[in-house]
Amino acid sequence: MLRIFVCLLGLLLGASRSGALNPSFDKETLALQVAMTDWKSKDSIHELISVMQDQIPMTVSPKCNSAVRNFVFDLMQKEMYAVRMVDAFGKTPSGLMLGHLLIFGHFDQCLGVRRFNATTGQDEQAANYCLVRLHEPSIAARLPALPAYGACLPLECANPSDAEGFVTGLFKPLRAAANLNAVQGICVTPLAKTPGFYVMISICVLILIVVIAAGVVHCAFRRRYDTGKGLNGTEIPLQQPSVEIYTQKTATNGTTVVQHTEITKKPKFGYANIPTFLRPLLCFHIPTNLSSIGAMAGEGEIAFLHGFRVLSMWWIILGHTYYLGMNFVANRLMLYFKARTLTFQLILNAGYAVDSFFLLSGLLITYVLVRELTKNNGKLNWIVVYFHRWWRLTPVYVFVMMFYVYVMPHGIESPWKLLIAQQGAPTEYCKSYWWSNILYINNFFPVYRKGQCMNWTWFLALDMQFFIITPIIVFIMYKSYRAGAAIVGVIVVACVATTMAIIGSYNLPIHMFQEPVTYNVTIQNAQINGSWVSGHLDGAFYEGPAPWYIESQYPAVYNNQTHNNDTILAVRNYEKDVDYIYEKPYTRITPFVIGILLGFMFARRPTYKFSKGGKLIAGAGWLVSTVVALLLLFGFHLADRFNMMPPIQTMSLSARIIYGGLQRLGWSAVCAWILFACNYGYGGYVTKILSLRFWRPFSNLTYGAYLVHMLTLQLYFASQRSMIFFSTINFITVFLSQIFLAYGAALFFAVLIEVPLLRLERLILKKTL
């Protein structure tokens, strides 16, 4: 076995003359000579090493050069630590033709190599793990990414420059690799704990203290209602929550009369004589917060919306599992083959679940606002409406963001972490653009999505932007339904027209796999340093991670260079669609405003029946909606719009304009019919399934699950030690485990942050817990 390792060494430091080697042999046969020779003399080993380094010198520091000599000498002497280091080097894997281009080696074995230090009398770390990219000019442009190679190097060589020089020398003896260079070197380094980390720890400790204090206060002041004695022995009234009931009756003249009744429901337990300043602590009482998540439905609640929301959330997690996981698979070409199958269209079209959420959000916001307007005779507390939305979303959002940036990186240690760091760790983007998330404009800033902080939270930005205009539309609709409906109609037409115009103007695709789109990008006085760019792109100043078209045009530029007035011919499949259409309010608002119409109808007309032929109309509605849904989900597959490999969309521009402009309107109509039918008694078994109490706890955790599901996915995939094998059963297993992890984390954040802050808001505004 050792001779095989020495054979690798021969490739590492090849030579072709003098010493114990036959000078007639070339570099590619040197490994065989080294392996077949029994190196017993230390002098002969030193001579061999000198010849090797003279013939093919490595571009490394003197300190690293000396360490390499010692490492090679110990390897020839069969020192076990050196053997383990060679064993941890990356080896050519099988499946290269399927996309296995990341050759990591053995990460943990390398970091665990120890060597006895005779001076100190202790075992010490002998090696460190480094990762480089392999750049070969003739093939780099044809690869989706530069291959990665993991090397287990002496500690003295564990820096980017020496790692690149070492690995470049490793492959020089191969004639086919004569022009190959190792670039973008990066090595494992201890992750420093920043002030942000300690701030997060302090916040967590503070929350823990508050939770403990809440438990103490709860135990001290909780009383049964029938024995509610104050601390001084006098009878005192306990907190008595009110239950509000709305009823609607139709008068003989056809007008609708809304009756509002408030009754008091006596609880079994309450808090006696509790000081005002201690009441906020009870908002953090964990058992109470847990019970609120799974509590029974309240008056006026639309039960079937819980199932609809949860299934939409699960669909999003399923889509993201595949979308993120495809970057980690060793057999990506098999994934491309799978993408051409009928069932895989459910994965490719998981983006429709986002439209379902937009429609649901518009419906629920409108439903609550109309009920509030009805209760208060057409008046709204506008400040409270907007504050509640901000308070509902932002605090837990900020906490998760800080956790993502300052804590989560300490939980990952793997080759993938180094690989991601080479391209710019996404957690670092938050340090530059956190403000755009807090202002809910992160779908506009930064301009390029690659530099977006928590790039899945563009949905929250859109949802908040839609919410800003919703109370105004609902108020107008409450005063004049025709005026409000007209506004909604204009918005839908404008959204469809805008989407069509953008697709036509920029020749954009409308699907994940599509024909390449070619366009020019002008670079003016831009400084390019690795994967970071500072300068003017297409006339606008940009500073951040290099857009993909710069990475593809300058794959070998890794030192500071300035490019002025360069024109890049950019060819890319998908990102431009994301930048121009996928995350913009003027192309995604259609389902939301349709939800406004639906929510208004649900609030104003709790019951509705078709006057004639109700069953026939309902059957036709279900038939049409099913046909439209199937066409949207499976139309590409049935029309054979995927060919070649990877699958490429071959839809004409005119077809893309029509399909891209109408697809979200069509999906919104499908969802609107499902919810309409369920609400008014035409849903049958669909209503029964969606109304199961099983969905309610998951539904109440949806916001937290959406925030954290990409964190749990990133933790799983980025913690792997090698590329993973794609198969349906593997990814379904990951998907199911991620549901458990995402909702578990969401429950944690809900009980400790989300629910307590909502109860605190209620305590301040309504003086009740």
Image (tube, helix red, strand yellow):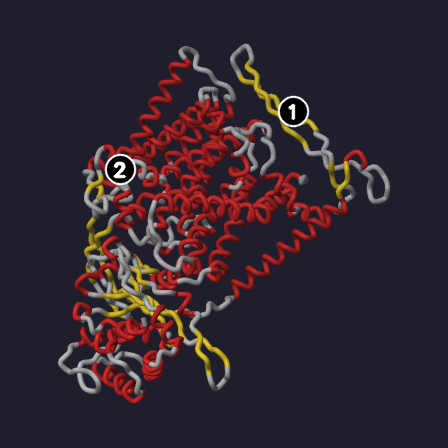
* Of residues 606 and 356, the one drawn nearer to the viewer in this rendering: 356
* Of residues 720 and 353, the one drawn nearer to the viewer in this rendering: 720
Please identify the residue farthest to the left as the structure is shown.
Answer: 24
Identify the residue at image location x=67%, y=39%: 768
Q: Is residue 757 above or below residue 299?
A: below
Identify the residue at image location x=20%, y=62%: 566
* Of residues 558 and 583, the one drawn nearer to the viewer in this rendering: 558
Q: Is residue 536 above or below residue 486?
A: below
SS at badge 2: helix
Please identify the residue farthest to the bottom as the structure is shown.
Answer: 43
Quadrant in the rendering for residue 242:
top right
Q: Earlier in the sequence, mark 1 or mark 2?
A: 1
Residue behind mark 1: 261
Which quarter of the rendering shows the N terminus?
bottom left
Residue behind mark 2: 500
Q: Is residue 737 above or below residue 226?
A: below
Q: Which mark is residue 458?
A: none
Quadrant in the rendering for residue 265:
top right
- In x, y percent, where is residue 645? 21, 46
The residue under label 1 is which amino acid type?
A: Thr
Identify the residue at image location x=40%, y=11%: 613
Q: Is residue 392 left or right of residue 239?
A: left
Residue 447 visible in the displayed image: no
Which quarter of the rendering shows the C terminus?
top right
* Of residues 541 and 293, the one drawn nearer to the viewer in this rendering: 293
The residue under label 2 is which amino acid type?
A: Met
